[in-house]
Image (cartoon, grey):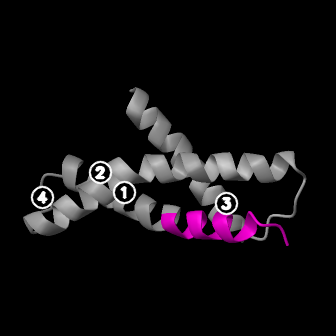
Amino acid sequence: MSRFNPILAFLSKLAIICNGCFVFSLMVMFVPKINYPVAVSNFAAVLGLEMAPVVSVFFGIALLVMWGKKQAIELPNWQTITNLLMLLFQLVFIIV
């Protein structure tokens, strides 16, 4: 076990939570019939729109470091795939 595995596991779980808030905040922004309390919407917006891209980029960099060093990645495949797809979606959302 390398010293990056606990960091990668933490970043993966944090990215899943932030990406869920990212999807929720996009729904609040683009679906006019959804009305949530302002505190919930603000919390999801900060966690999703501001923190999710940063955490996803850190996860991607940590994953590249692990692949570059040819170390075993001890994460479920669904977490890795979901986080990388959400990173791609966030980059497209930021650029467009």
Q: Amino acid at mark 1?
A: Val
Circle 3 crowding by C-alpha within 10 Å: few under 14, some 14–19, many from 20: some
Report which residue position mark 4 lands on: 33
Label 1 sits on a secondary structure element that is helix
Q: Amino acid at mark 2?
A: Leu
Report which residue position mark 3 lands on: 80
Residue 17 lies left or right of residue 62; in this view the side is left
Residues in magenta, as a range:
1-14
Q: Is residue 37 magenta?
A: no
Mark sitting on residue 26? 2
User: Quadrant of residue 95 in the image?
Assistant: top left
Query: Residue 17 appears at what percent x and percent y?
Result: 44, 68
Report which residue position mark 1 lands on: 23
Circle 2 crowding by C-alpha within 10 Å: few under 14, some 14–19, many from 20: some
User: Between tags 2 and 3, which lies in front?
Assistant: 3
User: Between tags 1 and 3, which lies in front?
Assistant: 3
